[in-house]
Image (spheres, helix red, strand yellow):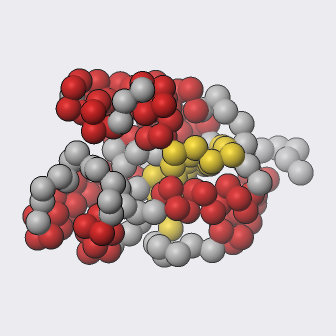
């Protein structure tokens, strides 16, 4: 089983991904960490040295590789579903889950975060909320293509596992 978590930065993809992978007894991969390991650079370094377009190509390559893994929960980068045909690739190769979190909550999480995020660096709270709302207007059409949507930031992983297994039974003839 392959599960892809999609949503805006700060939506909790990595946190939920770790909990869900533990609940399901399968591997967890944070796609940004995967890209950094493969390229021996941090995401901010890739953005600064090579630009966003090169980063998006590296992200696509990583996604193609991860789509061949079995029994894995993948926390994607916030923009991953919005470029190339990435969302379609994820939907064909696994189950996609959109973490739909309120922009105000996202802003608070991002302001509290110690992670270096190139797209929001140096923004005030008000600028950040405006940026999130503007970005979400562009990204929501991609995110909403996900198979499932979560609106609770503290999702119950046991219930989510049950939904995923039920979905797998429906989508896969002969699945036991």
Q: Pick whichever, 88 or 55, lies toward us.
A: 55
What residue is rendered at 64% in x and 29% in y?
68
What residue is rendered at 40% in x and 63% in y?
11
Q: How many marks?
A: 0
- The image shows residue 25, relative to residue 47, as above or below, that is below
**For residue 138, side relative to residue 67 (left or right):** left
- Residue 3 can be seen, yes or no: yes
Q: Pick whichever, 22 or 4, lies toward us.
A: 22
Q: Quadrant of residue 92?
A: top right
**For residue 72, side relative to residue 148 (left or right):** right
- The image shows residue 3, relative to residue 153, as above or below, that is above
The N terminus lies in which quarter of the figure? Answer: top right
Q: Quadrant of residue 105?
A: bottom left
Q: Position of residue 112 (x, y in %)?
A: 30, 69
Q: Position of residue 21 (x, y in %)?
A: 67, 55
Q: Pick whichever, 163 or 41, lies toward us.
A: 41
**For residue 47, side relative to residue 173 (left or right):** left
What residue is rendered at 52% in x and 75% in y?
154
- The image shows residue 165, relative to residue 42, as above or below, that is below
**For residue 75, side relative to residue 19 (left or right):** left
- The image shows residue 173, relative to residue 160, as above or below, that is above
Q: Position of residue 74 (x, y in %)?
A: 56, 46
- Residue 130 can be seen, yes or no: no
What residue is rendered at 37% in x and 30% in y?
41
Q: Position of residue 71 (x, y in %)?
A: 72, 43
């Amino acid at each position: 089983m392959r599960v892809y978590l999609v949503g805006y930065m700060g939506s909790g993809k990595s946190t939920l991904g770790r909990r869900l992978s533990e609940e399901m007894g399968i591997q967890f991969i944070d796609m940004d960490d995967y890209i950094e390991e493969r390229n021996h650079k941090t995401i901010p370094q890739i953005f600064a040295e090579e630009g966003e377009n090169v980063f998006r190509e590296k992200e696509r390559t990583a996604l193609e590789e991860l789509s061949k893994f079995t029994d894995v929960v993948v926390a994607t980068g916030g923009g991953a579903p919005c470029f190339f045909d990435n969302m379609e690739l994820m939907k064909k190769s696994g189950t996609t889950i959109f973490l739909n979190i309120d922009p105000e909550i996202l802003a608070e999480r991002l302001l509290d975060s110690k992670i270096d995020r190139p797209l929001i660096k140096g923004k005030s709270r008000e600028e950040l909320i405006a940026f999130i709302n503007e970005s979400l207007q562009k990204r929501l059409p991609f995110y909403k293509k996900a198979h499932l949507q979560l609106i609770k930031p503290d999702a119950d992983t046991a219930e989510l596992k049950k939904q995923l297994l039920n979905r797998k039974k429906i989508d896969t003839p002969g699945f036991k």
